[in-house]
Amino acid sequence: MNFQVTVQPSGRVFEVERDETMLGAAIRQGVGLPYGCRDGACGSCKSKLLEGRVIHGAHQSKTLTPLEEEAGYVLTCCATPQTDCVLEARTVPGAGEFAVLKLPSRVMTLEKPAGDVAVVRLQLPATQNFQFHAGQYVEFILRDGSRRSYSMANAPHNLGTPPAVELHIRHMPGGKFTDHVFGTMKEKDILRMEGPFGSFFLREDSDKPMLLLASGTGFAPIKAIIERIEHLALTRPTTLYWGCRSKADLYLHDWALEAAARLPNLTYIPVLSEPKPEDAWTGRTGFVHQAVMADLPDLSGHQVYACGAPIMVDSAHRDFVSQCNLPDEEFYADSFTSEADKHG
């Protein structure tokens, strides 16, 4: 028994199979709904159910509170329709543009620019044309069927020869996948992956000034977006704030400095929350989103792209909208939810 979902205000209609989530069906049919983690942890896919009935699978109660559920909100990533439904959701032009592929990839290079960060380049099969938007992510399919998500850190025009995607992987001690990356993984290893996923990418039809906000390895998709900005020769004023604990955590600091020197419209502001004495740090300190608020108290004319730890993304979203006049619909985010976050 299939159900029909109509998306308002766009009027797009798609079919959902029995026991399939709304988001799964939308991705399968190239309908661009907003989403991030696909695990009920980040809230990017939260939408209003105008008509119909759904059952929710496992999700975090803080992501969709009982009060929100009562008010008719759903998480499309874990909502399975029980009837035909009408959904109020912003459609994301381009989100369903590229086919989601399952493909093998081969480890080309593995570098560690910081003690707990690996930059991995994965060669793509020559037989498959893997396309994505700068800012999107892939999921690795592990032997036991579990999955881990990582954003591409290079833009699609910048895959090189042979074509390869670049990923920035932070070591989470005890993490099933990252222990492998930092322990036994070597060049020429084969990894299975699927993608592209996610609605976090540059809105190229806007001419608003851009604020790029990253914490830790949330810098990866932001780097891809900067490469895309350069490739398109965009002249929109762009400010990059990158928040880390200490100077060593700014693992591509030189890359960011060079990009800002090369691109006349890009300003780079690193912010450290816990600089070490040996850092001899004379730059900005504190929480990265608060540095933004000090510099840009009025964000009413901006677009914000935020990526990194959920606490940073959530705080920035709340404070930029409530205190800096940022229009809610101009905040685009990718929360890096770890396995611990998803099951916390």
Image (cartoon, rainbow, N blue to C red):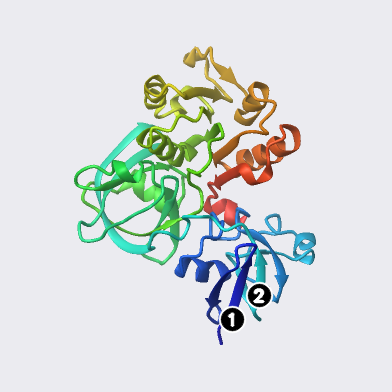
Q: For residue 305, which numbered disc appears in the image?
A: none
Q: Nearer the viewer, residue 203 or 19?
A: 203
- Label whose residue precedes the other's in the sequence (1 or 2): 1
Helix, strand or loop status at disc 2: strand
The residue under label 1 is 3
CA distance for labels 1 and 2: 8 Å
Helix, strand or loop status at disc 1: strand
Picture quarter with the N terminus:
bottom right
The residue under label 2 is 85
- Tell me: residue 142, above or below residue 51: above
Where, by quadrant of the figure, is residue 86 drawn?
A: bottom right
- Image marks 1 and 2: residues in contact by CB distance under 8 Å: yes
Type of the residue with mark 1? Phe
* Residue drawn at (34%, 39%) of the image: 119
- Tell me: residue 56, above or below residue 68: below
* Residue drawn at (19%, 44%) of the image: 161
* Residue drawn at (39%, 29%) of the image: 252
Is residue 20 something that shows in the picture? no
Query: 334 left or right of 289?
Result: left
Is residue 59 something that shows in the picture? yes
